């Protein structure tokens, strides 16, 4: 061990040995910084999750938490609490720089496709989430989920990382308003507003992106965190002077296209707010069976399960690849522990009333800033726990200040594309479909499904079916069912 490593180990005490910080070429300071970058990059979920699940009435006309009016503060506090506990669990159990929180997409499914069904309550809907999480946990403990992951060819795993890189870069551009759906809908997306970059928030995003790029190419430590904090300060100053205001009104309608996308940056009057955790334990495990029937419940559980099952696989490969933690077969260390914590997260999210929690690809932002161990996840978790009291400070960071990190990290992940043999069409075509369909469908699961199915079909067409791993056959079949779930429901007479 070098003198530097020895001194680092001495300063870190037991942390270095427990998290293997020096062994992975990192430092405590780097891990703390990376954990904070991940938090700032994904802290939007504290605001966004309540807006998605907290503003929808269930099948009985009540909002989440009970009553005839939304209680967004309760949803936000519980969202942050559950995310904090799970991030710490991931860091200490799996020692992997992967953060977790309420899953976007999954929460919309729970709100609009389950809770809103006639007669179904929010407790019933969260019970379905708990059931899904328990099933996934069983699949992990029996080794099935890990076996499926290891059966995926290395080239497809590489394509998953590249596809996710494009996906999160696209998320960053869309969330910042740099890329938008045009009002005319003449094209799927356009640059800014009417093909032009307009408004102060876009300026904040561009400044943050350019600053992150410059600092990164100059190899400045903490480049991404510096860019986020600098952009936030700039955003607060601009809002104080120009009074830009939010992009949408209380109903969610766009009234100010050049306004702030989500958070309106401003110095808060109060730095501390008392959290309300009243949602904890509000779930009914089998209540939905009485309301919509066992078949409908099974189909809903299957649809959530498949998305949860494969999203995390793609995410941990992408984050592990960016951190340089994958082995020669593209597998991260302590795969089973990662998947166990992620499965527990689904159960915990449902049992806490905030929807299924899952691994976040935004963790790659912290990894891009140097995080290599579970200590970064612990730091992210502590930040989430503090945010239950310091929500006003979190609200200061607008999308436009945080999203440049996603674009930069997207670039870093796409660099792995050179690991795919593009002259071998047997792997190149499935890889291509995996890569392009993730951003084009706004779904990691859809991209993986297309790649898996194409891989099996091509092998069969070439007379190489015997070379396909049995679990790849099973997985491809499950994806076919996933893609045709709506027609299947129609045939079974289930809404």
Image: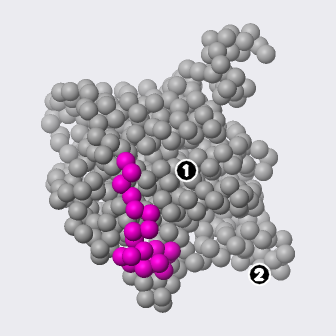
Which residue has dot 2 on it?
A: 461
Segment tinted magenta in the rendering:
280-299
Q: Secondary structure at mark 2?
A: helix
| Pointer 1 or 2: first along the chain | 1
Q: Secondary structure at mark 1?
A: helix
Q: In which quadrant is the N terminus drawn?
A: top right
Q: Quadrant of residue 251?
A: bottom left
Q: Is residue 429 left or right of residue 377?
A: right
Q: Say whether residue 290 is magenta.
A: yes
Percent across and percent down for residue 163 are: 58, 56
Q: Is residue 184 visible?
A: no
Front-most of 400 and 317? 317
Q: Is residue 33 left or right of residue 227?
A: right
Q: Say whether residue 146 is magenta.
A: no
Q: Quadrant of residue 73?
A: top left
Q: Is residue 233 left or right of residue 329?
A: left
Q: Quadrant of residue 324?
A: top right
Percent across and percent down for residue 292 are: 38, 78
Front-most of 44 and 119? 119
Q: In which quadrant is the C terminus drawn?
A: bottom left
Question: Residue at coordinates 70% horizontally, 43% vertically from top-left?
Answer: 334
Dominant secondary-structure state across the stretch colored magenta: helix
Percent across and percent down for residue 461 are: 77, 81
Front-most of 162 and 364? 364
Query: Which numbered marker is on residue 344?
Result: 1
Question: Residue at coordinates 30% horizontally, 27% vertically from top-left?
Answer: 233
User: Count the marks: how many?
Assistant: 2
Q: Describe the colour scheme in one phrase.
A: one colour
Front-most of 357 and 431? 357
Eyeballing the image, is 348 above or below 428? Answer: above
């Amino acid at each position: 061990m070098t003198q530097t490593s020895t001194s680092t180990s001495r300063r870190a005490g037991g942390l270095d040995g427990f998290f293997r910080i020096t062994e992975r070429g990192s430092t405590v300071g780097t891990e703390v910084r990376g954990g904070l970058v991940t938090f700032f990059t994904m802290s939007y979920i504290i605001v966004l999750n309540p807006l998605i699940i907290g503003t929808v009435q269930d099948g009985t006309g009540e909002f989440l938490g009970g009553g005839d009016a939304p209680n967004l503060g309760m949803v936000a506090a519980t969202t942050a609490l559950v995310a904090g506990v799970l991030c710490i669990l991931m860091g200490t159990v799996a020692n992997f720089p992967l953060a977790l929180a309420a899953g976007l997409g999954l929460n919309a499914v729970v709100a609009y496709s389950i809770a809103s069904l006639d007669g179904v309550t929010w407790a019933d809907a969260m019970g379905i989430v708990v059931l899904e999480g328990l099933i996934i946990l069983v699949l992990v403990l029996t080794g099935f989920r890990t076996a499926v992951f290891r059966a995926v060819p290395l080239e497809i795993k590489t394509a998953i990382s590249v596809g996710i890189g494009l996906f999160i870069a696209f998320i960053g551009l869309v969330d910042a308003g740099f890329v938008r759906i045009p009002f005319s809908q003449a094209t799927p997306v356009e640059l800014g507003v009417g093909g032009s970059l307009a408004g102060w928030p876009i300026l904040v995003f561009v400044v943050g992106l350019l600053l992150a790029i410059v600092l990164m190419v100059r190899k400045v430590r903490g480049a991404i965190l510096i860019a986020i904090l600098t952009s936030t300060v700039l955003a607060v100053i601009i809002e104080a002077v120009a009074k830009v205001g939010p992009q949408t009104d209380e109903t969610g309608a766009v009234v100010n296209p050049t306004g702030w996308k989500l958070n309106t940056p401003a110095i808060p009057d109060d730095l501390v707010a008392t959290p309300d955790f009243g949602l904890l334990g509000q779930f009914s495990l089998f209540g939905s069976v009485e309301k919509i029937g066992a078949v409908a419940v099974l189909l809903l559980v299957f649809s959530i399960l498949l998305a949860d099952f494969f999203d995390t696989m793609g995410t941990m490969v992408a984050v592990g690849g960016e951190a340089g933690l994958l082995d020669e077969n593209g597998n991260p260390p302590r795969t089973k522990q990662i998947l166990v914590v992620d499965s527990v997260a689904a159960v915990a999210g449902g049992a806490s009333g905030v929807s299924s929690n899952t691994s976040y690809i935004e963790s790659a932002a912290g990894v891009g800033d140097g995080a290599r161990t579970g200590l970064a996840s612990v730091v992210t978790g502590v930040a989430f726990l503090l945010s239950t009291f310091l929500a006003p400070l979190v609200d200061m960071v607008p999308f436009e200040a945080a999203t440049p990190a996603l674009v930069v990290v997207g670039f870093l992940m796409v660099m792995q594309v050179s690991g795919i043999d593009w002259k071998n069409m047997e792997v190149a075509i499935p890889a291509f479909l995996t890569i392009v369909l993730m951003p084009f469908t706004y779904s990691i699961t859809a991209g993986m499904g297309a790649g898996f199915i194409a891989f099996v079909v091509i092998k069969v067409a070439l007379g190489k079916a015997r070379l396909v791993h049995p679990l790849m056959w099973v997985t491809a079949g499950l994806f076919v069912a996933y893609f045709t779930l709506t027609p299947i429901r129609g045939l079974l007479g289930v809404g």
